[in-house]
Image (spheres, grey):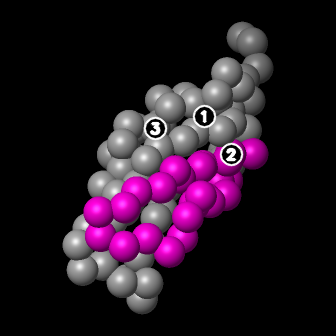
Amino acid sequence: STNYSVHTTRPTATITLADSTLTAGESTTVRFIFNEPVNGLDASDIVCPNGRLSRPTANAERTLWTATLTPNAGANAATNTIRV
């Protein structure tokens, strides 16, 4: 039979915010930069407990995904996290 290789490492991501000092009612662009192409990234793949994210959209290479973050009212810097 043909030999197969199994890809066992996960892509890594760098997450950046266009504006990291938001107040309630403001929003900003979030960039997810991956070290390899990622297929089908969805808002449900992203943990953002103190805000709402729009549906992520990808560049042609699927290495850069962007979404809009709107923080929840009352969220503060000590509790804000975004994880993929």
Asked whether the residues under the numbered discs 2 and 1 touch, taking CB atoms below 8 Å apart as contact, a structural biologist would say yes
Q: Vertical placement of 3 versus 19: above or below? A: above
Secondary structure of residue under mark 2? strand
| Residue 7, image quadrant | top right
Horizontally, residue 74 falls left or right of residue 76, namely left
Q: What residue is pinned by disc 1?
A: 38
Point out the frontmost of discs 3 and 2. 3
Residue placed most toward the observer, 10 or 27 = 27
State which tag comes first along the sequence, 3 or 1.
1
List x then y, in percent, for residue 28.
48, 55
Write down the residue under mark 3: 56
Could you tell me which residue is drawn at 57 percent across and 30 percent down?
Answer: 58
- Give the image location of residue 48, x and y in percent: 37, 62
Between residue 6 and residue 72, name the one nearer to us.
72
Q: Secondary structure at mark 1?
A: loop
Residue 16 visible somewhere in the drawing: yes
Residue 74, horizontal then vertical, whole percent: 24, 80
| Residue on which disc 2 sits | 34
Mark 3 Cα-neighbour bin, 10 Å: few <14, some 14–19, many ≥20 = some
Residue 35 drawn above or below residue 63: below
Q: Are marks 3 and 2 in contact (CB under 8 Å)?
A: no
Region of the chain picked out in magenta, as a range: 12-35
Tell me, yes or no, whether the highlighted magenta stretch contains residue 25. Answer: yes
Left or right of 1 on screen, residue 67? left
The amino acid beneath tag 3 is: Pro
Instruction: Check the picture and name the quadrant holding the N terminus.
Output: top right
* Within-10-Å neighbours for mark 2: few <14, some 14–19, many 20+: some
Mark 3 vs 2, N-terminal side = 2
Residues under numbered marks 3 and 1 in contact, where contact means CB atoms less than 8 Å apart: no
